[in-house]
Image: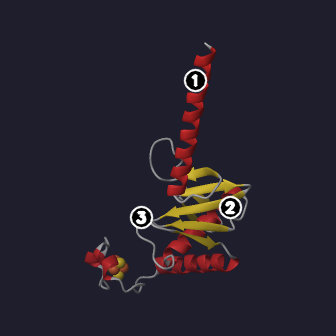
Amino acid sequence: MTLFLGLLTLVLLLIGLALLWLARWGRERAGLPAGRVIYMDMGGRGRQRVALVSRRHGLSGRPDYLVENRNHVVPVEIKTGLAPPQPHEGHILQLAAYCLLAEETYGHRPTHGIVRYADRSFVVDYTPALEARLLKTLELMRTDLLASDVARSHKQPSRCRGCGYRDICDQAL
Ligand code: SF4
């Protein structure tokens, strides 16, 4: 009986270790930093999908992950493509928007966020300069929304090829 209980304990211990290893492996594979996942928006049942909202800035969004570690919240944005030499400006601003939303929602200013591409991650510092760039961009976007005509903001034919407005856009490449 003692031998049986000993074996059972050992098996349970090994299963526990395997589960821990699997959880860590999954976390590293997703590019998540250490800490507790307090928000995720990767689809699936039972997962939190409520948008974070900033009434002050008229902004809302759903980061892929928010990881909390000792009152620090780190937004993590997952991109499926291979990493460019530096994160795209749009991805940096998207991450900055999640930092702003996380600050307003949880009351702590994130020091940084992470953009995770298929093959590598970038840590992006959430500096006052980046926040100012984000707010300026939001202001320009609001101005453009009210304008009757807006100039194309890129030179990438591939973006136009996949654009839903291509048929009615007079600036399509
Ligand atoms: S088709 Fe027009 S709206 Fe669409 S991406 Fe190209 S320029 Fe922009």
The label nearer to you, 1 versus 2, is 1
Of the numbered discs in the image, which one, if any, rests on residue 104? Answer: 2
Tag 2: amino acid: Glu
Specify the quarter for ligand 1: bottom left
The one nearer the camera, 125 or 160, is 125
Mark count = 3
The residue at the point 31 percent across, 74 percent down is 165
Q: SS for tag 2? A: helix
Q: Is residue 41 above or below residue 46?
A: below
Residue 93 quadrant:
bottom right
Measure the C-alpha gap from mark 1 to mark 2: 51 Å
State the residue position of label 1: 7
Numbered mark located on residue 80 in the image:
3
The earlier-in-sequence mark between 1 and 2 is 1
Q: Determine crowd level at label 2: few under 14, some 14-19, many 20+ residues with C-alpha closer than 10 A.
A: some
Q: Residue at x 32, y 85 (%)?
A: 171
Quadrant location of the N terminus in the rendered image: top right
Q: Earlier in the sequence, mark 3 or mark 2?
A: 3
Q: Residue furthest front?
A: 3
Given contact means CB atoms under 8 Å apart, are the residues at marks 1 and 2 in contact?
no
